[in-house]
Image (cartoon, rainbow, N blue to C red):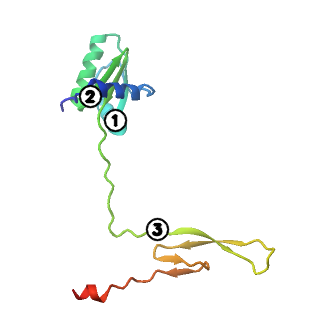
Amino acid sequence: MPQITLTPAQRKVHRAEAHHLDPVVHIGGDGLSAAVKKEADLALKAHGLIKIRVFSDDRAAREAMMQTLADELGAAPIQHIGKLIVLWRPMPAKEKPVDEERMPGPRDVKVLKFSKRGGQRPEVKVVRVLGNQRLTPGGQVKRAKVMKKSLKKSAQ
């Protein structure tokens, strides 16, 4: 995958966002192994913006690692400062499964029952109301009525 190109303004925004981040991937003496690339890819999928620490003293090697990671992972190189590399890739949108037959779940409702005598505290009762039920002002649980369709609309 080719790397993403960003404008200097976009790169500046991502640099500011990455300032407080800790490195999530560390590249040791073995350099860019398949495991390091896999971890960097997983971190980019999870976070979008990551810092990588490289334990190498050769600046040209670190620069080459940043370009290689950006090219292979389809990310944008944001910053290379010292032994830290910052990469960014837009996070994929998460898909929520849609369940058509899903009904509203039960909910617990507190009902106050007032005493007929004036000085007593009201009794608090917790009632579970299901999705097809409703609570009356008197505190009783009633089943929901089936909505009838209009005869005029169904005739057309």
Estimate the spatial distance between the alpha carbons at disc 2 and disc 1, rounded to whole Å.
10 Å
Estimate the spatial distance between the alpha carbons at disc 3 and disc 2, rounded to whole Å.
44 Å
- Residue placed farthest to the left in the image? 2
Image position of 5 (left or right of 27): left
What residue is drawn where x is 27% and y is 14%?
61
Residue 148 screen position, x and y as percent: 36, 85
Q: Is residue 42 above or below residue 27?
A: below
Q: Which residue is mark 3?
A: 105
Residue 93 screen position, x and y as percent: 30, 46
Residue 130 screen position, x and y as percent: 50, 73
Q: Is residue 63 above or below residue 24?
A: above
What residue is drawn where x is 33% and y is 55%?
96
Give, as a three-letter code, the residue at label 3.
Answer: Gly
- Give the mark nearest the N terminus, 3 or 1: 1
Q: Quadrant of residue 102?
A: bottom left
Disc 3 secondary structure class: loop
**Does residue 105 appear in this view?**
yes
**Does residue 24 appear in this view?**
no
Disc 1 secondary structure class: loop
Q: Which residue is mark 2?
A: 76
Q: Which mark is residue 48?
A: 1
Mark 3 touching mark 1, by CB under 8 A?
no
Disc 2 secondary structure class: strand
Q: Nearer the viewer, residue 27 or 90?
A: 90
Q: Nearer the viewer, residue 143 or 12?
A: 12
Residue 53 screen position, x and y as percent: 38, 21
Q: Which mark is residue 56?
A: none
What residue is drawn where x is 33% and y is 84%?
149
Q: Nearer the viewer, residue 15 or 58?
A: 15
What residue is drawn where x is 79% and y is 76%?
118
